[in-house]
Amino acid sequence: MPLAATIIAMAGLALIAIGPPGPRPVRPTATVEGPGFRFSPASVALPPDETLFPDDPQTAILNRTCLACHSAEMILTQPPLEREQWEAIVHKMRETYKAPLDDRDIPAILRALGRISADAAAR
Amino acid sequence: MKFDAALANRLGRRRLLKAGGGFALGGIASGLIAEGRDEVRLPLNGGPLSRPLSSAFPGKGGMIVQRTRPPLLETPLSAFREAFTPNDQFFVRWHWADFPTAIDADRFRLRVGGHVRRPLTLSLSDLLALPGIEYAAVNQCSGNSRGFFDPRVPGAQWGHGAMGNALWRGVPLKSVLDRAGVRGWAVSVRFSALDEPGMEGAPKFLKSLAIDHARDGEVMVAFAMNGEQLPLLNGFPLRLIVPGWYSTYWVKALSGIEVLNMPDDNYWMAKAYRIPVTPHASVIPGSKDYPTEPISRMVPRSWITSLPENQVVAYEPAILLGGIAMGGDCGVARVQLSADEGRTWHDARLLEDHGPFSFRVFEGRVPISRPGRVALLSRCTNNRGETQPLAANWNPGGFMRGCVETTHIELRHGL
């Protein structure tokens, strides 16, 4: 590989290395063939995740605590849940899935989730 | 005979209503798409019912969006009128948002290690050089139909479309393990993939099978789905196929195989995807301290798919219905239909057999005594003699639903 190409390739790899999370700027080109089958390069551009929680004082906190890992839809599609169920879910998100939730925010998060459930029940 | 969706589209809705029974009725694509709205309402056991219907995910068309990130995309019931589910409508479910969106086939490697004599690093060319196998198998999420649980349970609120049937092609996992030389004391085999947890310290998605299961010659490392390479969203370039078992074991973007000398105690086996050790994995809501085990084999199920929920059709004394059935981890022996809440059952005709792990299309007539709203039931019995129960199971995970499902329609004179 010529030196210039090597440098470009290495720069590309460096970009990839510091890229995630988010779309990775790889553009695969090579194919692989074997008996009766051929792999073509595979890539997808995922659609933007645009759904937000209602921007009111009660539920806005969910926009900065939940969306790092998953869409608002995960919560907005839940059936009306009891407070203990939301507590168990928030506990799992923090303890198992390592969501960086601050102790001081938990009561407000639970109030917001309760509000989402109340809205779901009213619909 | 297949459901003739193309014909149905040509005929148009009004004509279909006049035409009465017959599979042409099945061509009405739920009525919702036809109205031009990008939204569907799932007939779940309570709300929220509305979901976007989207073709925004590359390679996927008309999917029910349960969650954008990480993607949970459900297949509309209208896609289940034939035995095989098209790749562009096959359901999608990722645990972590950090999965590769571009993969170079020539740089990809599958690593095999742990308690083996010869750790391997296999290219896709190496895999293609091994003797291949091919079979049809249903891939169904453990939580498929969770939205019908009563009382409701948290989790992805799927309708019935977290499933699909495809013709899978690949190599037996046994061939790969034999090449690596499994040690005599091996107990289980653990599978890892290219996806990564979103947060540091969170559990990477790993699943395991007992060593004898992994070496049964049926479990497959698949590279093709319905004759094409796997869509990236369904696990390109390699996916584990565990026929007859729930999808949680069908690890996507499979990149690591590790032979263990003990049962796997990682989070996704020891804590998640566990069911009560009871008939139908069912407990009374609120129960505590019952023994659990990892979910495993699937159970018989069936769905009437020729008519969407709440469809109005012209009255006939015996209406023709069609749908799909699955035996679980063995073939379909029988499908029966009822329009009187299960008091009388009428045998449906089973169409082409694509093997024990495939969907089986059925069609049959059920007598209906008078016009009005009617609940249509289908009931599958598998080759083990297991029959779908009328009563729904319940567990807090919303797993393993298998009861008889109901489709309501309204029959009217003079349409």
Image (tube, helix red, strand yellow):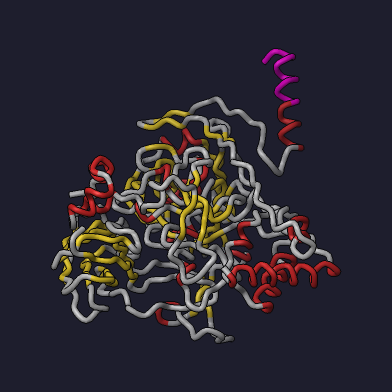
Rendering coords of residue B321 (x, y %): 22, 61
- Point out the stretch of residues depicted in magenta: A1-11
Is residue A27 rendered to the left or right of residue A60?
left
Residue name at image x 64 percent, y 72 percent: A118
Specify whether residue B90 is painted magenta: no
Rendering coords of residue A35 (x, y %): 37, 31
Is residue B209 rendered to the left or right of residue B297?
right
Location of residue B111 with respect to B331 vertically, above or below = above
Work out whether residue B111 or residue A86 is closer to the camera in this orientation and state it. Answer: A86
Rendering coords of residue B16 (x, y %): 23, 50
Location of residue B247 with respect to B300 vertically, above or below = above
- Residue extending farthest to the left is B317
Work out whether residue B268 or residue B47 is closer to the camera in this orientation and state it. Answer: B47
Residue B262 visible to the viewer? no
Residue name at image x 27 percent, y 70 percent: B376
Is residue B92 rendered to the left or right of residue B288?
left
- Counting labels gives 0
* Quadrant assignment, res B155: bottom right
Specify whether residue A3 is painted magenta: yes
Rendering coords of residue B269 (x, y %): 57, 66
Pick the quarter of the image with the C terminus of chain B.
bottom left
Residue name at image x 17 percent, y 68 percent: B366
- Residue extending farthest to the front is B414
- Residue extending farthest to the right is A104
- Magenta: main secondary structure equals helix
